[in-house]
């Protein structure tokens, strides 16, 4: 996959989160502080501007995107996305292209970084309820013989199902955890924005 595809992907994600901003705020209003859409859209507007102007290699691009999110999103999700991407950047090659193994490793490193920092388990009603099954399913599909592209698309088609599966759960991490059982019956906003990230692969051309 080329860095050009990577940049197109992040521009698409920025546009999608911009469009979903009100919905993400509403979801966060129910179990948090109503800022997830606003904060993420603000950070991604910075990312979009960077992607439209830059010709950086893979590693530098992910580093710049991580820095932009870390410094402009704020809150739990800004720290998690930002620090996770910065960790990924240290492992990526300074190259204009990334192969299947590099992409898989990038996802692995990202999810491990999220887990180490946020300490959320599967079922805690967070973005990890999308990222953990996504990582597992990606590996399953690659082991079954899918190309990197097919595996990404397969995960992308299931991401929203995993996000929606957070509805009945009781939040164990983040602000929503203060609500205890009253967090049940609401979709986790961070799980939805992560599902939207995955869904952006469905519309990206083959790299
Ligand atoms: P804040 O809660 O600080 O206002 P956001 O509203 O931007 O931050 O993000 C909230 C989302 O962050 C939640 O919906 C959840 O998915 C995610 N989140 C919160 N805490 C954690 C955690 N410890 N690990 C993983 N994800 C978390
Ligand atoms: Mg919030
Ligand atoms: Mg907040």
Image (cartoon, helix red, strand yellow):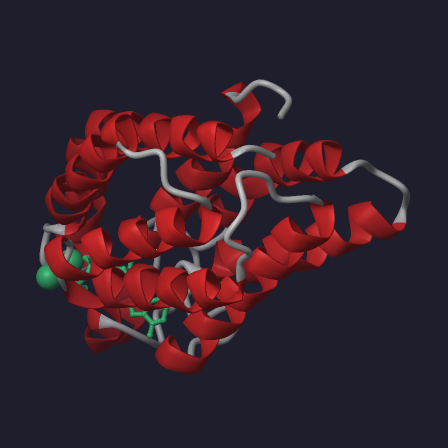
User: Image height check: is 151 above or below 68?
Assistant: above
Residue 85's spot in the image, x, y percent?
39, 60
Decide if residue 34 is in sight here.
yes
On-image quarter of the C terminus: top right
Q: Nearer the viewer, residue 68 or 40?
A: 68
**Quadrant hosting residue 155:** top right
Q: Nearer the viewer, residue 41 or 166?
A: 41
x 33%, y 59%: residue: 81
Decide if residue 122 is in sight here.
no
x 22%, y 54%: residue: 69
Looking at the image, residue 39 sits to the left or right of residue 125; the answer is left
Looking at the image, residue 81 sits to the left or right of residue 166; the answer is left
Q: Nearer the viewer, residue 79 or 191?
A: 79
Residue 17's spot in the image, x, y percent?
26, 33
x 60%, y 64%: residue: 108
Q: Quadrant of ligand 1?
A: bottom left
User: Image height check: is 184 above or below 8?
Assistant: below
Residue 30's spot in the image, x, y percent?
17, 52
Looking at the image, residue 196 sits to the left or right of residue 2; the answer is left
**Quadrant hosting residue 55:** top left
User: Image height check: is 99 above or below 7?
Assistant: below
User: Image height check: is 11 above or below 124?
Assistant: above
x 54%, y 42%: residue: 159
Residue 131's spot in the image, x, y percent?
52, 57
């Amino acid at each position: 996959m080329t860095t050009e595809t990577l940049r197109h992907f992040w521009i698409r994600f920025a546009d999608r989160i911009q469009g979903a901003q009100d919905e993400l705020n509403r979801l966060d209003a129910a179990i948090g502080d109503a800022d997830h859409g606003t904060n993420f859209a603000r950070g991604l507007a910075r990312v979009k501007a960077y992607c439209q102007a830059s010709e950086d290699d893979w590693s530098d691009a992910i580093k710049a995107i991580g820095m932009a999110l870390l410094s402009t999103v704020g809150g739990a999700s800004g720290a998690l996305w930002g620090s996770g991407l910065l960790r990924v950047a240290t492992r990526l090659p300074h190259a204009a292209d990334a192969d299947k193994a590099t992409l898989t490793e990038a996802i692995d490193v990202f999810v491990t970084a999220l887990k180490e920092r946020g300490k959320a388990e599967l079922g805690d009603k967070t973005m990890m309820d999308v990222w953990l099954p996504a990582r597992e399913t990606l590996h399953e599909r690659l082991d079954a013989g899918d190309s990197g592209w097919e595996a990404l698309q397969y995960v992308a088609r299931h991401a929203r199902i995993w996000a929606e599966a957070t509805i009945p759960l009781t939040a164990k991490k983040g602000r929503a955890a203060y609500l205890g059982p009253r967090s049940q019956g609401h979709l986790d906003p961070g799980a939805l924005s992560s599902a939207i990230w995955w869904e952006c692969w469905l519309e990206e051309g083959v790299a």
